[in-house]
Amino acid sequence: MSDASESVMIVVAGSPTPEERAAVEAALTGMAAEWAETKHRRVLDSESEWQSKSRLPDGRRWQQD
């Protein structure tokens, strides 16, 4: 694991300021931590009732043209 001063993100395009880079990295790190806390929940791994009822008769999901 990296220490606090080492970035875990690689910028592949653009040139963000240090503040922008830190803000994006903090948001992504927070999202990853939240996901890690909830990934064990079965509800996230299964289809919702709405999703299952919105399927077409042949099993495909409805798609807007």
Image: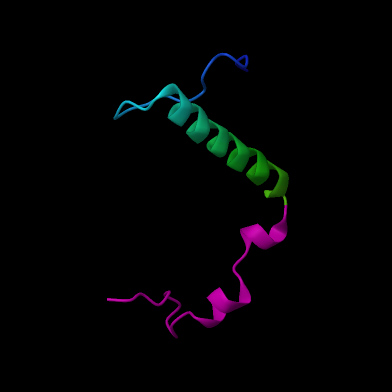
Along the line of sight, the residue nearer the viewer: 22 or 51: 22
Residue 44 percent coordinates (x, y): 64, 58
The colour mode here is: rainbow
Split into 4 quadrants, where in the image is the N terminus?
Answer: top right
Image point 66% across, 38% down: which residue? Answer: 33
The reply, left or right, for residue 14 in relation to residue 41 is: left
Split into 4 quadrants, where in the image is the C terminus?
Answer: bottom left
Image point 37% across, 27% down: which residue? Answer: 16
Image point 44% across, 22% down: which residue? Answer: 18
Residue 4 percent coordinates (x, y): 62, 17
Along the line of sight, the residue nearer the viewer: 39 or 5: 5
Q: Residue furthest bottom?
A: 57
Q: Give yes or no for residue 46 being in the magenta stretch.
A: yes
The reply, left or right, for residue 59 in relation to residue 15 is: right
- Residue 45: quarter of image: bottom right
The reply, left or right, for residue 31 in relation to residue 55 is: right
* Depicted 50 relative to depicted 28: above or below: below
* Depicted 17 relative to depicted 3: above or below: below
Q: Give yes or no for residue 60 being in the magenta stretch.
A: yes
- Residue 37: quarter of image: top right
Would you say the magenta stretch is mainly helix, strand or loop?
A: loop
* Depicted 27 relative to depicted 7: above or below: below
- Residue 15: quarter of image: top left
Q: Which residues are magenta?
A: 41-65
